[in-house]
Image (tube, helix red, strand yellow):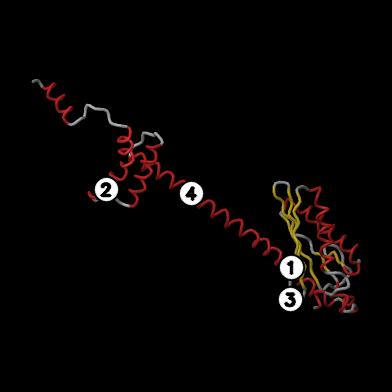
Amino acid sequence: MNKTEQLEKLLRKFRFDRPVEPGVRERISRNKKRQFTAIMKKTGGYTFSFGIIASLFFALKKLGLGVSIVKTALILAAATTAAATLIAVGVYTAATHMSEPLKKDDALIEAEKQAADLAEKKDLSPIAHEESRDAIARRIGVQLFTADIADKKMATTVTDAIAEELAAARGGEYTVNARRSNDGKRYGMILVGSVERHDGAYTITARVSDVRDSRVIFYASEEVLSAEDVAAACKSIARKITQSIPAGNPAAGK
């Protein structure tokens, strides 16, 4: 008996010459991961990270992708790095956007302090002392709105528009446009605000505070999609201020 015949005999003896039944093939395929994991644990080469790599490896195998353990580890490392980068970018972006409103408020507070100092200096005016405390308490001093250098003209337009709307609604006696001459009139409330442009759109923010203690009496913000809508936003802000602080209600005096 030659070697070929011996090999054929061995194959028949151990049934290697018969095709593997579909059920057996499925069971073998299904138990590959479990058996592989058991072997690696016995040899001491199994770790938590290796378990993740092995799970991904067999998942890719089921999808018909012919990858090795090494390639699977590289894929997992690349995916983990990309995910960490996206999370870091997301956290940085969120933190940046959360800090923007604080910066805006700081700018308004600074403008408010400057306006309050200016109002206090004007307390020595002879004309101011002739006015009643009640009239002063009811009056709003509209300060020049803050804006980027490129939008200074728009800030001036917004300031004048809101001042004119307030004068029409509350009366010129109870509204002072501090950007222009105020004839020495004192005011018990200060209106400060900002104009910000974002890709052609505008955000107008306004706040009314008590001159004496900087207590916020009113706050509003309007967003418009274009410069053509700014006038309507100014009217809306002035209307809300009038409704919240009518001329007959000395809000700053309370």
Nearer the N terminus, badge 2 or badge 1?
A: 2
Residue at figure coordinates x 39%, y 38% from the top left: 60
Residue 41 horizontal/vertical position (percent): 26, 50
Q: Mark 4 points at which residue?
A: 85
**Are discs 4 and 1 less than 8 Å apart at CB?**
no
Point out the frontmost of discs 2 and 4: 2
Marks 2/4: CA distance?
35 Å
Q: Mark 3 points at which residue?
A: 213
* Secondary structure at numbered mark 3: loop
- As displayed, is residue 92 above or below residue 116? above
Instruction: Give the residue at the far left of this rendering.
Output: 1
Q: Mark 1 points at which residue?
A: 112
Please rate how many residues cluster around mark 4, counting C-alpha atoms within 10 Å: few if below 14, some from 14 to 19, many from 20: few
The N terminus appears in which quarter of the rendering?
A: top left
**5 or 42: which is nearer to us?**
5
Marks 2/3: CA distance?
74 Å
Identified by mark 1, the residue type is Glu
**174 or 50: which is nearer to us?**
50
Please rate how many residues cluster around mark 1, counting C-alpha atoms within 10 Å: few if below 14, some from 14 to 19, many from 20: many
Point out the frontmost of discs 4 and 1: 4
The C terminus appears in which quarter of the rendering?
A: bottom right
Identified by mark 4, the residue type is Thr
Nearer the N terminus, badge 3 or badge 1?
A: 1
